[in-house]
Image (cartoon, rainbow, N blue to C red):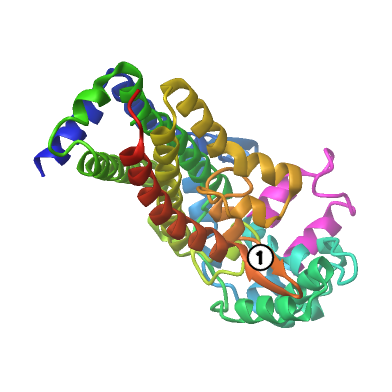
Amino acid sequence: MRILLLEIRRILCSRRNIILLLAGLTLSVVMGIMPITYERASYLDADGNIAVLSGRDAIEYHNSLYEPIEGDVTPEKLENALAQYQEAIGEAGGLSLYDEEFPTEIRVEKIDPVDPLLFPLPEVYADPGTGLQTELTDISLEEIPDFYDRAVEHIGDLTAREYGSQNIVDKSTEMYRQIDTPFQLYGDYSANALDYIVLNIFLLFLICMAMAAPAFSENYENGSDHILRCTRYGRRHCAGFRLLALVLVFTIYYLICMGIEIRILNQAFGTESLKTSIQMVVQVIALVPLNVGEVQMVTVLGGLLSLLSGICFALFISARMRSAMVSMLFSLIVAILPTILYFAVGLSWLVFLWPSSGIGMQNSLMYQLLDTKFLTIGDRGIWVPWVIIAAAAVELVVFAVLSIRSYCKHQVV
């Protein structure tokens, strides 16, 4: 225990590490505030003029505006919302909502109050052959009562076009049927806020990698490792407690940083909005039966697993390298490699079998949770989030063992 405490003290007393830790805490506050500042809302003031709200004022206005439509997203609510939208378009002379000449008064009075209910309709009623979304004005009101059945059909059409495998079609539609319906809608939680959670996890991961990468190699470089190896607990115990200390420090630090960001976001958007089905916030094709709050939790815990897997891989590299700078550069390259590979080769086993494959941008666990991506083996498929979680769990153990073993076998020259 004394060795563990000494290792934790060594980590927290380093000037470089203190700067990095403070930078991560500052970034977490910034990542929590930024999505709030992007929120905008328009309304008619007492004089009949258009007024614009921003930030928390806009969120509070939207939360009050959407109160009449909160709760179950029933086909009746969807039908009324679509009818109101089509009526508004008719009053505007058939102009597109995105046309600069579209009357702002009509948009504010008729469309904005039901806007969240309109969000899933173009996707669900997309063309089965091409997948192109259907304009709201082209959707018949008579089709809306079958909304949830049509959503399941849309998932089948989507996976059939993408994979051409009946096994994957059956698996994806079965997963979608497990989602509780009707969907739930509460308040105004922004998809941008979830994007900033993903971004913050990535930045915290880079900070932790920069701290962990030189853990062994800097001792090789400055000669202090020669002394440590001469002590009673200078090999396996030293390596094991150093790894454990880093894991404990990074776990607590990561949870504190993510807790700060999510607390700021949830306080601003309202805890009631966390009960909203994720299908009503990001995209209706999400295969997970989770609400916004549950997606936050899964993203944070999955991110922690991937982060620790990446950290153990960085320690393995550090135990093999004699230069702290080379170890750090190599570890940071590996950290961003899944994101680079995803943009370069797309959906591939190569991308998601790397340590920390669930951290990054489009390859991140959250974005894969909210999509219909499968990795194929013949005509069969495995849902990408399962691959990310399984790979991270296995590699966490494997690279932890390899890093200790590599340090013990290191030859002092």
Q: Residue 206 magenta-drawn? A: no
Amino acid bearing label 1: Val
Nearer-the-camera pick, 35 or 300: 300
User: 145 left or right of 326?
Assistant: right
Question: Element at badge 1?
Answer: loop
Residue range highlighted in magenta: 83-112
Q: Is residue 209 above or below residue 377?
A: above
User: 65 left or right of 75?
Assistant: left
- Which residue is denoted by mark 1 in the rendering? 284
From where the camera sits, is residue 273 visible?
no
Q: Quadrant of residue 38?
A: top right
Q: Residue furthest left?
A: 2
Q: Is residue 331 above or below residue 175?
A: above
Principal SS element in the magenta part? helix
Pointer 1 local density, CA inside 10 Å: few below 14, some 14–19, many at least 20? many
User: 304 left or right of 276?
Assistant: left
Residue lying at 60% horizontally and 36% vertically, measured from the top left: 51
User: 281 left or right of 298?
Assistant: right
Percent from the top left, x then y, of residue 181? Answer: 57, 79
Q: Residue 100 magenta-drawn? A: yes
Q: Quadrant of residue 12?
A: top left
Percent from the top left, x then y, of residue 135? Answer: 84, 60
Residue lying at 68% horizontally and 46% vertically, measured from the top left: 342
Q: Quadrant of the N terminus?
A: top left
Nearer-the-camera pick, 57 or 150: 150
Nearer-the-camera pick, 95 or 330: 330
